[in-house]
Structure formats: structure tokens, C-alpha cells
Amino acid sequence: MTAQYIPQVDNFNAIEAFVRRVYNPSGDPTLDAKISIQPYAYRAAFADLLNGTSPQQVIQIAANADFVLTSPRYRAVVDNVVDNTQLDAPPLVRILLTDTGSQEQLMSEAVDLTTYFGHIRTAQFEIQYPRIISGRSGMSVQVTNYSNILTTPQDYKLLELTFAGVLVRGF
């Protein structure tokens, strides 16, 4: 019997190894026992995202843990019908993420949403290098609908962003 490939387990092992390297660079086994890693997700939703608008939200990060962002996802709904085939078209939205604790932007300027986010309905999506947001901090999320480049600009009934990753607690 051959073993089955389970991407989620392999992915968690890679995330765990990354976290342990960052939080315990010397490899001290006594420090490894003092780190707790737990899958977690934050959500930001923007209702009625009209062409040319740039709303912003702040996600508060847990006070007792850092958040390591590994798998950001999006869903864009153009009308009230969830099964709309237009869901598969990438939204013309740019995003700018800023760590409010350090005021560090996670990108140099706003980038197309699909540069950093995978679609919620597709297979596993991972960013190339996880981002660490400190506990007791926040993440400012600003989105801009730039669909005015189209003949008929597109408004989005809902833009849902899921920030999946892990919480890291030290004891």
C-alpha cells in the first residue's frame, strides 16, 4: 500500500519549521517546547465596493500571540447571486497591507489583489514567504476598486478577504 500525499500536513510541517527557525534561531530544544503554534484566520469584508473607492479596515491581532500569515484568500461577489460565473474573474482591486504596530507596509505600494491572494474556491494557496504580524498589533487593510479601466466599471457587492495562518505563543 502506498502512502497518500496530504498537502495540509506537509504545509503545516513547513510552517512549523519556519516558525521554529524564526523564534528559536539557535535550535535550543528547551525553547522549542515553549512555543505553541495554532492554525488561525482573520477576516475582512468590504460590502458594496464601488468603482473608484478605497475603503480601509484594521484587523486587531490577538494580544497574546503573533500572527504568521501564510495563506491569504479572497472572494469577490458582483451581485447577490453567489453562484455567479463572474466569481471566477479576478476582481480589479488593489490592496495595501500595513502592520499598524511597526507601520511597515507588507508591499511597497498597493498591488493587484491576485498578486498576494488566492481565490477561496481554488486549491491551497500559499505566499512565498510567510509574514509575521506582532501580537497586540493590527493589520491595516486598504482596498481600491480600479475597474474604471473597463468600458463598464464593475462594482462588487462583497469583497471578502481571509487571512489564514498560525498564531504563535511563547510561554
Image (spheres, helix red, strand yellow):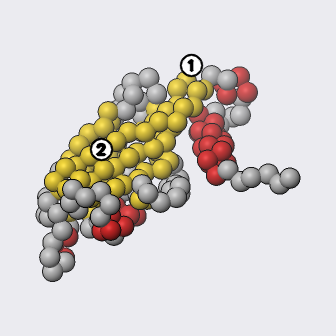
| Residue position marked by numbered label 2 in the rendering | 44
Residue 131 in picture, x, y percent from top left:
47, 46
Res. 105 visible in picture: no
Q: Please give the name of the residue rendered at 62% of the width and 43% of the height, measured from the top-left corner.
A: 12
| Residue type at the position of mark 1 | Phe
Res. 31 visible in picture: yes
The disc at residue 161 is: none
| Residue position marked by numbered label 1 in the rendering | 171
Instruction: Decide which of 66, 147 is in the foreground and name it.
Output: 147
Residue 162 in picture, x, y percent from top left:
38, 46
Element at label 1:
loop
Residue 71 in picture, x, y percent from top left:
48, 50
| Residue type at the position of mark 2 | Ala
Is 36 displayed left or right of 132 in the figure? right
Counting other residues with Cα less than 10 Å from the Cα at mark 2, is it few (<14), some (14-19), or many (20 or more)?
A: some
Instruction: Decide which of 31, 7 is in the foreground and name it.
Output: 7
Give the mark nearer the N terminus: 2 vs 1. Answer: 2
On the rendered image, what quadrant is the C terminus found in? top right
